[in-house]
Image (cartoon, rainbow, N blue to C red):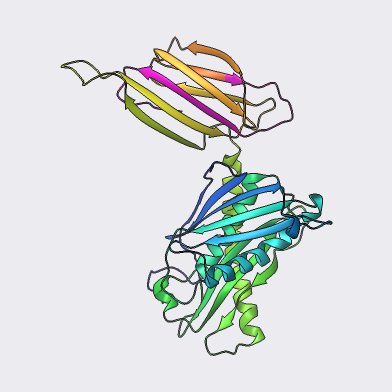
Amino acid sequence: MNTRRDKRQRDASREIEITYEGLARVDGSARFSYGDMTSLASVSGPMEVRLAAEQASQATFEVFVRPISNVPATESKAFSSAIRAALLPSLILNRHPRTLIQLVVQALSFTRTQWKDVLIASMINAGSLALLNAGSIPMRGVICAVAVGRLPGAGLVIDPSEEECAYMDAGGSFAFIFAEEVGGSAENVWTSWRSKSGGFTEKDVFEARELARVAAQNVYNAIKTSVSWMGSAEPFELTSTAIRAHGEKTGGEDEDKMEIWCAHVFPMTSPPELSLVFLDVVEEFNVTVLMDNLAFSGIESLESSDSLPCQFIRFGFATPGHHPRITIMGSRRDKSEAAQYR
């Protein structure tokens, strides 16, 4: 019988959303959401470490949590400690001794309840995604976290909403490491399970853990799917701004527009290749390609289609076996009302 207010089954989470942000000046970034509970994470490193924090045998792993408002305080430090403890079992830090790996997590949702477990779970998952997006830190597996709550009369539920948290008498987050190549089931590496009354049995923890394990598998499946299109040759996110090149639009004439755009792509072919298709005929086209933060002249051809009113430009990179993140910045001028990309 379903007794949850939002009509979800007890083992169902809210909609999972994953976005790879492509933030500047970091090695990897990602956003993870359970419904409206959203967190953003970025990873930098391995990089130079402060002398006081340097470790001779492994890299230093630091986690900083930024609240949605105000400055980081005691709660943020507690979140940082929890996220670090959950993610640490997945990292192979001895490959980069005397360096620093820094994870910064930003809360993008505000919660008024004392149960912060859903927010912590989304932060852990965002951190895992940012580490995967960076690709610069060796990992044993992927950490996936899920929040579990216990409601009087309804029992254990996955991903409790803020309304449900007001009635919970026990709850916590569970983090599991998934590593398919190693074999075996997902291993529980961290939990924050606790009871409002101060006491719980081993059976309570076991039941909550097994329910969380199934839900964490769904998170892992979503992450695997997201990674497959993170590495596609299509731009993951395209930001464009249209600016007026000439004066006001005159009667009966199309406005002449200059479009400035930037795209981050992750080509996985060997050698990497990228095509941008413009569905409108381009009068003027300029492009700059940045590969591994260095300007690179890799334009192979600018061709027109005989069958369709479009032009496309193809980039070829003679770098077999290397799959860089490529940033493409350019501008174009045409007579169209809007630019379209494929």
Residue 341 shows up from this direction:
no
Q: Residue at x 43, y 35 (%)?
A: 239
* Callout count: 0
Q: What secondary structure do most residues of the magenta stretch adopt?
A: loop
Q: Residue at x 73, y 59 (%)?
A: 53
Which image quadrant for residue 173? bottom right
Residue 158, horizontal then vertical, whole percent? 52, 70
Q: Residue 132: x percent and y percent? A: 64, 48
Extreme-left residue of the structure: 251
Location of the N terminus (image quadrant): bottom left
User: Is residue 333 on the magenta stretch?
Assistant: yes
Q: Would you identify the image quadrant in which residue 298 lies?
A: top right
Give above or below for 273 relative to 206: above
117 or 11, nearer to the observer: 117
The answer to which quarter of the image holds residue 105 is bottom right
Asked if residue 303 is positioned above or below residue 279 in the image, the reply reads above
Q: Position of residue 50 (x, y in %)?
A: 71, 54
Region rendered in magenta:
315-342
In the picture shown, does residue 3 fall above or below 70?
Answer: below
